[in-house]
Each structure stands twice: as C-alpha cells, then as structure tokens.
Image: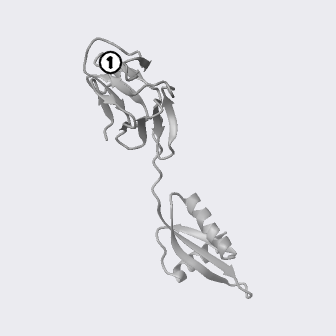
Amino acid sequence: MTSILRAGENLNFWDRLISDNGRYHLVFQADSNLVLYKEPEHQPRWATNTVASGASFVAMQPDGNLVLYTANGVAKWASNSNRSIGNYFLGMQSDGNLVIYRDNPSAERAIWASNTAEEPEPTPEPESDWCCTVWKSNSRGEEEVIFNGTIQASSRTSAFFKCNQIREENFGTGHSISGGSCSSIEENLAKTKEKLKGS
C-alpha cells in the first residue's frame, strides 16, 4: 500500500491510499464514492459524494486535476485544480489531510486540499513508580498495614486517587503515597506514623 497517487496513475474499485502512520485511508468504493476514513474508528472524514454516479476509476491527471470518470470517460467529480502540465501527486498525509502537490510536499507547492487535517493526538504523560500504603485501625486503635505496594501513575494526584481506590476496596481507614517504589512495610508505616504525628 502507498500514500501517494502520482500523475498518470488511477485508483480502481477498492484501491486505497494509506497514510504513513496507518490512521487515514482514502478508499475508492464500489458504489463510486471516494471516501477518506479515519481508522480504526472507520469514521468518514471526507467524500466526493458520488454514490451511484457510475464513476469507475479515479485519475490523477498530469495537469494537476483529480477526476472521477465513468468507463466511457465522463467526468463525475473533479478537484478543479488543473494547471499547466507538471509533476503532480495526491498525498494521503498522516495528519488526515488529502493534498495535491506539484513537485514536492511543501506548503507552497500545494494546489488543492480536503482541509481535513487534525491536531496531533497528545502524548500521554509517562508513568512512574509510587508507593501506596493502606492501613486499618484495629480494636486497640493501632494502625495495621493491609496493603503496601508499588503503583504506576503519571502524577502525585493520580497516584493519590489510585491508592485511595485500593483503600476503599480493602476497607482501609487511611492511606499514603510516596515517590518511588515501596520499601519495607515497617519503614513505610514508620513514615506514615511520623506524618500523622506532625499533622
């Protein structure tokens, strides 16, 4: 599969262009519609709206025009981007935009676009180790550690809520978190008691 349709090349039924990141597919369907999908959601982002038009192939012409033709050569849709003869190509980009360029894929060389570019998806914050200690007060009023383990979270706030969920699931009466992986139960309990004394 390729992301580019060069001048003089055609798309036939079920041929497709796929962006380099695999997220966007331009498909010439058997119903004569040329559709841009976002995957894996299979969400239509753009189309020529040529269903049942009789178009049987898509041509990237040497004059820069992208045209859907019937088998008899009747045009059913065009990008209306015709210029002088040149080295044009249609590119399915990784940002979701479908663009016709002349010579090279630079902004000043673009002559037509579907205007379907999307903002890049945010990069998730990296997770790090946090030590979660959960305790329960016994009948003598002493804190008994019922959970001491390392959890993964992207921030102290996220770690706090994850640890609190563990506390609720184990019917604990309190919990604490500290950065890094867990040390011994006794050491964490000592740290927790010191915090309780100082509060």
Q: What residue do we see at 30% from left, 15% from top?
A: 63
Q: Disc 1 residue type? A: Gly
Q: Please state which of residues 136 and 53 is positioned toward the viewer in this rendering.
A: 53
Q: Please state which of residues 93 and 84 is positioned toward the viewer in this rendering.
A: 84
Q: Secondary structure at mark 1?
A: loop
Which residue corresponds to mark 1?
A: 64
Furthest residue in direction bottom, as rendered: 140
Q: Position of residue 37 (x, y in %)?
A: 47, 38
Q: What residue do we see at 65% from left, 72% from top?
A: 167
Q: What residue do we see at 70% from left, 75% from top?
A: 173
Q: Please state which of residues 68 and 128 is positioned toward the viewer in this rendering.
A: 68
Q: Position of residue 117 (x, y in %)?
A: 45, 32
Q: What residue do we see at 48% from left, 26% from top?
A: 48
Quarter of the image for the N terminus: give it: top left
Specify few, some or many for label 1: CA neighbours under 10 Å numbering under 14, 14-19, or 20 or more.
Answer: many
Tell me if 188 is positioned left or right of 90 in this view.
right
Q: Does 46 appear above or below 74?
A: below
Quadrant location of residue 166? bottom right
Tell me if 44 is positioned left or right of 12 in this view.
right
Quarter of the image for the C terminus: give it: bottom right
Quadrant location of residue 95? top left
